[in-house]
Image (spheres, rainbow, N blue to C red):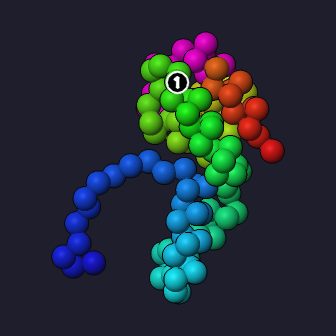
Amino acid sequence: MIGKQVISRENVPLYAVNEVLAERSKDGELNYEQQQAFEYSKKFSKITPAKGEKLLKELREIEGLSEDFITKAVDILPLDVNAARLISGKDMGIDNAKLEQVVAATSKYAK
């Protein structure tokens, strides 16, 4: 890792991690960390990429939600307001009306 530096950072949902690592695994063997991330993403990703993109777009339309919260909501798909409040973490300023909108959106896409 010598000589490498972070160029940019962005939040990526698990379904996207799964897609990227699946493509990389076709090109060659993944290193240990990549393999662990790939296994994790296969195990815990709850949504397909097509549905995930739609859900991301829907959640980004709700004003006042951070990108961190949106990514967590797509990964976890909270089905009630209490679960959504738990994943809000540092964004405790999110009111119940917005959390209800999040739950309404995520419940449509839950398997």
Residue in the picture at 76% in, 40% down: 110
Extreme right residue here?
111
Is 14 left or right of 105, judged from the image as shown? left
Q: Is residue 94 above or below residue 56?
A: above
Q: 55 above or below 31? A: above
Return the x and y of residue 42 as percentages of the image width and height: 67, 64
Q: Please name the amino acid that badge 1 sits on.
A: Glu
Which region shows up in magenta? 88-100
Q: Is residue 100 left or right of residue 56?
A: right
Q: Is residue 91 visible?
A: yes
Q: Residue at x 75, y 32 (%)?
A: 107
Where does residue 82 sit, x and y in percent of width and height? 67, 26
Residue 90 lies in the magenta-colored region: yes
Identify which residue is drawn at 69% across, 51% down.
48
How far across and down, in percent of the image, does residue 4 sit? Answer: 23, 72
As drawn, the residue found furthest toward the left would be 3
Count of numbered tags: 1
Which residue is label 1 attached to?
61
Q: List x then y, in percent, for residue 75.
A: 61, 46
Q: Is residue 15 magenta?
A: no
- The structure residue drawn at horizontal position 33% and vertical position 52%, both measured from the top left corner, is 9
Q: Quadrant of the C terminus?
A: top right
